[in-house]
Image (tube, grey):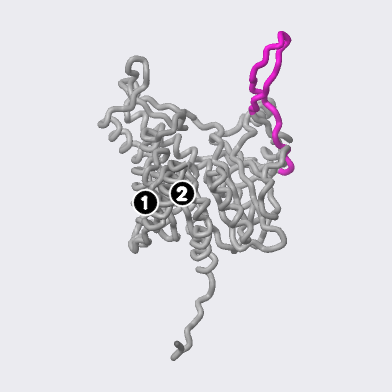
Amino acid sequence: MRGKVIALCLVCAMGAAGCAMRRAAAPDRASLPAVRAQDIDWPARWTEDLDQLAGRMPDQLSGQIMQFEVDESGAGALVRKSMPYADVTARRATPSGVLLEVNYRWEMWRNRPASTWQSLRFLSWLSDPAAEDDALAESLAATTTGTSGTLFIPENRDPVGLAVFLGGGVEYDWALRWDMLAQGWAIIQSGTDAKPIGAHWEERFVVDSEHPVSAVAPQIAQRVDDQIAEDVYAAEAFILFARDRCPALRSAPLVVVGLSRGSFSLPALVARLDSHVDAAVIVGGGANLPAIAMATALKQPDLVLSGPLVNGKASLPDPTTRRELLDAYLASSELDPYHTAASLNAAPTLVLQGMFDRIVPATTGKVLYERLGRPERWTYPLGHGGVFWMLKNDRRRLIAWIDAHTLEARLPAVATPSGGQ
């Protein structure tokens, strides 16, 4: 029992230390060179005849679901089956892809504050879909996942603003969304869960005598830029949908929140929206994605880089090769947060980081912080999961920060009467 008390006191002390270690905003951010949408060579999407393509989308979305089945001999096994999980209720073309409005076949949000909500899926192509009807139908049937999104609008009132969440989705960060929704914010949750359709997609890249740095680094850059662009195009489509659905949002404040993996795409989204973001919050983020991939404690990262096989097992590239690879990657990538961080130089930005983060290594979080121009930062002597645990505890303070830099910042200044006290 005594051990539990000591552990609890230690956690409380760590949380208090995190609060004490918050740093004020640096004054030099405005001097950073800006990054805007027109400065970026965005990955091209097929955008011709999207209205026709939208009309051809299937009536149901299906996914691979594990089921337990018993065969004729009585033996049981888990098998993957493609089963419908949502019905498509509407289709619309956007500037960069097809947006589907869907109804899920189960209730997902049981404990949310009173709100209307709409589930969405976004699909876009890096190359032209097949022209023949049969091939197109087959192509569409195989691409029914897309990037997920959900729009929540407070009931019986106009929203005070729009908050776009990229990534996340654990118990601790959902508490933040529900509190903001209850206080009048409309919420978009963007899933960042789809691979670009038609993209050359690799999860493992090997650097060895047959695969030199000069050839591999541009491939990694394309892989990263395509994925970030997909996240950004989807979030942009969800924002356009929300403003069409609720006209009050067209002039309302906009805040973007990037959580863990979602934070990698947040600076590019701000660049795409081109100075129309009132504030940004980055939780558990970092810059230079191959550096994150090579140092992360995740057992199965989305991006894996290795050197030659040693005794039949993959090894990390040697330190010299790693430096060359990271330098060549940064020279090729445009959408890595290392480059797009400067898009936030005009927006109030808050960074939440764990000093001992091993999932998005703290060293890469420090790189992002410096590339952002050292904005306001709350640091915690915790790991990646600990930051999200503190996010739930600190959510009211965080909402107060968001309100101060969005809602209150838009209030007209009140002049002080001359001679007043």
- Give left or right: position of 14 versus 148: left
Q: Position of residue 126 (x, y in %)?
A: 54, 36
Frontmost residue, 180 versus 228: 180
Instruction: Identify the residue shown where x is 68% and y is 29%.
Output: 137
Task: Look at the picture and state if 189 lies above or below 408.
Answer: above
Across and down, in percent, residue 281 comes to 47, 54
Q: Which residue is mark 1?
A: 369
- In the image, farthest residue toward the top: 73
Q: Is residue 185 above or below residue 296?
A: below
Measure how far apart labels 1 and 2 are at the Cα level. Answer: 11 Å
In the picture, measured across the screen, residue 241 lies left or right of residue 311, that is: right
Q: Which region shows up in magenta?
A: 64-90
- Give amino acid for label 1: Tyr
- Considering the whole magenta stretch, tell me its main secondary structure: strand
Say which amino acid is labelled 2: Val
Q: Residue at x 50, y 77 (%)?
A: 413
